[in-house]
Image (cartoon, helix red, strand yellow):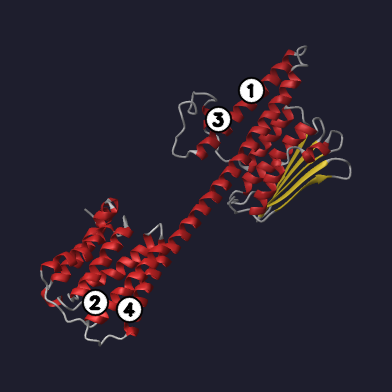
Amino acid sequence: MSIQGAGRVWRRLDVTVRDLPLGILFLVVSVLPGLRGHGTEVGDLPTRPFDALAVLTLALECLPLAVRRRWPAVCLALVTCGFALDQLRGYHSAAGTALPIVLISAGSHLEHRRRATVVLLTVAYVPLAIALSQLGSGGETPAEFVTFYLVLALAWGAGAWLRATRLAEAERRERVAAETRTAERAQIARELHDVVTHHVTAMVVQAEAARYLTAAPERLEQSLTAVSDTGRRAITDLRHLLDLLNPDHGPGPGTGPGHGTGATEAKEPRTPAVGRVLTLVEQTRRAGQPVDFTEQGTPPASTGSADLVAYRVVQEALTNALKYAHGSRTSVQVRHGEREITVEVSTDGTGSPSAAAVGSGRGLAGLRERIGVLGGDFHAGSGTDGGFTVRARIPAGGTS
């Protein structure tokens, strides 16, 4: 097994099993002949050889380390009792070093009654220091007892700092996750608005027009065909959007060749490019909206998400023209520069362009936000002739 594999197996073990080797290590080190009587010494008591009670003392100081993270309060209580017994009996074992480690662990992992624990430990230390001072030969000064207490307090403080750092990191991750979810929801809402609103608006306009074409079968057939084509495009775009939401789920049986909308739609690019604006214009024309389309320049090799945003600008502007200025002449101009794409969509004042400026507000607000992220400029407003104009300058090569 590789080192990485062993590490993964080790991390999957229960936290008590992972902490147990530390307690065993302290126990083994404490019973080594060369280290007996050379551990932590508080007070001035003579060192006593290990006896039967020393076994219990070492067990209290070392073995609770196995539960230092699962039950930190229990571990702290047992180790503290073992340490007090160690010092009062004069064993002075190396296991006494476990007390600062347990204080760090308790300061880091103890969840409840933290202040009460600090007060209780402080109160318990006072009689221990007095007992050690009376039992000793008098060589230990009060300042030395205070110094040792400050060392223990520093260990607890280090654990508290680790806890605060861990909680702050958890809060930061939770905040980032919440912001990410909010951004994703906003992006999904924008995409659904762009896809559904445009296609459904075109279908409604085309269906309404078909009601008056019963006397002209050829034109009625063309109108119904346009409705069907628009519906297929809506289904294709929605499937693409669902694939983006669930990338691990491959194309279903209804999206492959010979299913649903056919092989041609299954092969369409998932992200619309500026070159598809012409298809968008033609679809709008079939819905009864006169549209003039002009495209200048050559798209750069890499546009990032600028081409998609440009497509959405034209899509939103034509959708509003269909809904609020149906029948008014509309002009679409797309200019490709070396570092930016400029889009201008204007509708004259023969329809109801003022309503187009209002609409639901969601589409234009979403476009303004997306273009602002890319560092571009966006303007939408009424003109002097009563029409409505949408202008966007989109830097190429950015990501949305």
Say the numbered circle drawn on residue 148: 4
Say the numbered circle drawn on residue 40: 2
* Furthest residue in direction top, as rendered: 215
N-terminal of the pair, mark 4 or mark 1, is 4
Q: Are marks 3 and 2 in contact (CB under 8 Å)?
A: no
Can you tell which quarter of the image residue 68 is in? bottom left
N-terminal of the pair, mark 2 or mark 4, is 2
Amino acid beneath label 3 = Glu
How far apart marks 1 and 2 lie (CA) works out to 86 Å
Can you tell which quarter of the image residue 338 is in? bottom right
**What's the residue at 17%, 82% (across, down)?**
46
Amino acid beneath label 4 = Phe
Residue identifier under label 1: 228
* Furthest residue in direction right, as rendered: 385
* Furthest residue in direction bottom, as rendered: 139
Residue identifier under label 3: 265
